[in-house]
Amino acid sequence: MTLRLSGGVVPGPDRRIWAPGPRGRAVDPDGEAVPGSPVVLGPRSAGPEAADRAIAELTRLLAAGGPLAAGAGVDLGYGFHSARADGAAGDRRDAVLAALMVPGLAGRLGDRRAVLVALFGPDATKPLGAAAQAVLDEGRWPVLRFAVAASDVLGPEQLVRVLELRAPDGVDPFPGGLPSVVGGQLTRVLREVPRPRRLALLTDLWQRVCADGSTRLRRERLRASQGRQDRTADLTARYRRYEEEELTLRLRLELGPEPTVLQAALWQPSAGYWLTRATRVLRDALAATVLARVAVAAVDRGLDAALAGHRHEIEAAAAELSRAEASLSARRSAGLTGIPARPGSYLRDILARSRPGEPLDSRAASYLGQRLARAGDYGRVVLEAVDDLVGSLIGEDSVSLREQLAGWAGTPLTVWRDRVGYLSPGRAERWDQRPVLGAEPPLPALADRLRAAPDRPVAEVETIGDLLWYAELADALAQLNGHPHAVVSPHRHGPTADTDPAPPDEPLVPRSQSIPLAVAGAAQLVDLGAKVPPRCRSWPELVAGLVDDATIATALTAAFAVPAPVEHFDGTVLPGTDARIELARTARQLADWSYYMGNCIAGPHYVEDATRGRSALIALRAPDGRILVNAELRPSARGWRLEEIRARFNEDPDPVLLRRTASWLRAVAPPERAIPQPRRAGPHHETASDRPARAARPRPAVRVLRDVGHRLDELAAATVAEPETVRAVETLAVLATWLAGAPAAPASDPHDALTALRRATPAAVARACRLTLADPAGPGLVALWQASGHRPLARAVRALAPSRPGAPAPPTLDRLAPLLVDAPLPGSLRPLARVGQVAVARTADLVALRLRAALGTLLRQDAAELADAVRARPHLGLLRAAALAVTSWGGPPTGNPHALPSTPDVTVVLPRRRVRVPGFPQSSLRDEGWQSGWPDAIELDGVPDGFWDRIAAHGLLLPSSWLTDGGWVPLWSRANGPHR
């Protein structure tokens, strides 16, 4: 069989192909060679020694330029050239680009005109060639890759303009991806855009990607400027020790130098103490703000310029720390970090080691740089101190104390603002936080007061209680993290701040991190049916028009018919690797994949085939969650075929991963042929003589449907319609609103929500369960536990009976038992599981089982949300099942009676070798009540085998977090109470 080369080329009769063999020898290639494998093409008459020399030269080429460069037809000497087997990603222009990046290869690629045509097409001109040569000489590879990709949509004169573009130092706008792939995507996106406007759009795209790259580089520099080790915890401990010392000084001031224990115990913090603490926290916040601002300026403009530009701020903040306070702040404490407790100490150090107008020497610069490296640590500690202060004072009910605090909170910051000004421009006019700790009723927010008095300066209107200075500290910290400002949210009892906000999760919005990602995202929207808006003048306008297209929402609603043989591999590990298999179930999931991978897997071709069950689409994820490859699997008569597998930006996958995937796929059970469905239109009471004769005995799947299909469908419809089941389904559907990790609108049909839960991974269901338990407006643990106990299909199966005298008996419950467990079904039951209301009831059963499994996971993790819910309202059935499950998982290790290596921290609630359970009402582990709890315990992952050995070894166990409100006895009594 003749091996085809890239592009489908077949060598002529006078040419021959050699492949690298063992020990670097040339061998004949296998006709089934791996797609894209490098080979050598040479004269058929060449001898073995010449072929071996060519293979050696090919090996050096691969080491320098990779397999892609082999497809450029590099001259290997003696009439030999490099080549690649057909089937790999990319085309000749990608290969030529890869070869050009290898020093010394430009002259071995053939005629200069041929290279130019390979890169830009047959319309390439001399000016374009001169511009490309200038780019090559300067090594500006990103813009060359961009121009090669854009050659599909731009003319030669426009490409010359593209090659004039430059990227900031350190920014690579085109770091990965094949120009041929990007060119095809650009063609789909800009097909309807007039050619003159295309250049403006691509130029704007380049500039925005460069700006995004510059922002990322700046963020990296800012974060690198801070200490390599996060000292927030150490500094927090140091700050709290300072507060303790401050409290001790106040205690001795008010009670005498040596107060007795009784005096100290009866002492209540006075207004003087609270005012001292509040003033100290305010001054620390101002100092931490200045320290962070100087640290940011030092990264952006250099240390000397930063000190010169912010010296007035440093002087003003350092003046707020007295010499005595600075001494107490810097005094070392045994076992704690040597960093001063308060940020003002470092500002005093900066003033002491710098002089206005004088440049710093290297020693002073290093000294001050070490202090600025702790700006982030100080900012986080002081933000927490502000939160603690406000939280402590909000609940004070002393009238005299509140009056004095109101006076402090109503004090203006005029002196500080006169010296420093406002550090977050424009925030005061938008500051909607109502003043805290002030007089009652509280004043309107600062923004409202400014609108009511537009002629008054902000400093005359602002007070300490407005907490605008808190927002300025949060903004300074956010800028130190590379953000323009913090996300500060006003609340009744004080604001909250996010100083490192995550970017919005917008999987459909193309990202501007790189040219390939931005273009792939736009192409995906076009493939989904979106139309490019007319007369768009910038890349953001084009993207906004695509995203707003109404057809996108419709395209993403498709749910996939996942073939059964591969469905149960979802979430498992690919054999021989650490990659996890993730199966696509919806079009939106494909959009998420495409958003990261920069490919077209969310296109209509893939979506249509997956929706109809013609293919299965998977992602292989690394342990850190990154997608390594996407693959399309197609069923065939002989098994499963790996139709396509690609790495990020449609590049070739890792060869080892490719082999492992192919090996796994060969072991997957072949797809089953379509099983004939029963004739639902015919009456089910017909006699045997009325039925058409069959030449052969029906297959098991058909017999099961014929015998029980209609009857089980009727019984399932009845159980699904029962009021208790309806309420249970509505309760379970609440979980689906938390599947994405944030509250979402509930589905119009609760059964649609159950379908989403059934398709979710176990980890997603456990997370949704945790978030639902934490939601005060949620149904609560008791309702969830009771709802997960309703199994409509199980009740329908138990109710099966012959429908009339003389009818064949239905299959036994044992035969139908697989319908009631969360495991792949045998082929004989799959058609039955798809019948109308049987499918609906089975989905409810499976979701109930998976909720129990999720609760078992939270139990093993000792989740705080589960413990809080149990303490708030214990349920007798859950309490018994959890005690049985936790006990069955193992006993406490020697020397630590309250912890398990594989289970949550536990407490022994019943001593070893005892069966009488303490508390009222009395019970025994041998009672029917406890023993009947084993089915529930097993659904929590309990293990009945060896349970009594566990009781003899360590007794009955329960998570310690469940027993913090008085222990086992009151918890047991409440669970048996009237409101259980």
Image (cartoon, rainbow, N blue to C red):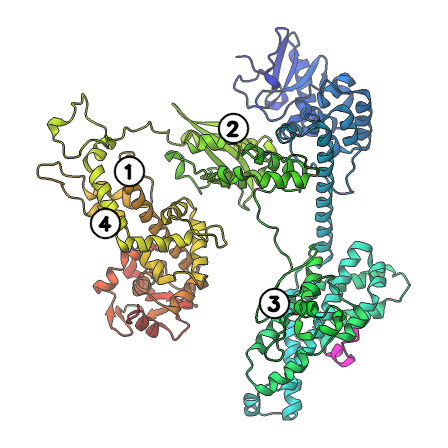
Residue type, mark 2 in image: Glu
Residue type, mark 4 in image: Arg
For the stretch drawn in magenta, what is the main secondary structure? helix
Q: Are marks 4 and 1 in contact (CB under 8 Å)?
A: no
Looking at marks 1 and 3 on the same chain, the residue that comes earlier in the sequence is marked by: 3
Cα distance between the residues tagged 2 and 1: 34 Å
Q: Which mark is residue 495?
A: 3
Q: For the magenta stretch, what is the residue range?
A: 318-328
Residue type, mark 3 in image: Pro
Cα distance between the residues tagged 3 and 2: 52 Å
Residue type, mark 1 in image: Val
Looking at marks 4 and 3 on the same chain, the residue that comes earlier in the sequence is marked by: 3
Q: Which residue is mark 4?
A: 795
Quarter of the picture holding the C terminus: bottom left
Dot 3 lies on which element? loop
Q: Is residue 631 or residue 30 the one in the foreground?
A: 631
Question: Can residue 338 be seen in this snapshot?
Answer: no
Dot 4 lies on which element? helix
Q: Which mark is residue 835?
A: 1
Residue 326 falls within the magenta-colored stretch = yes
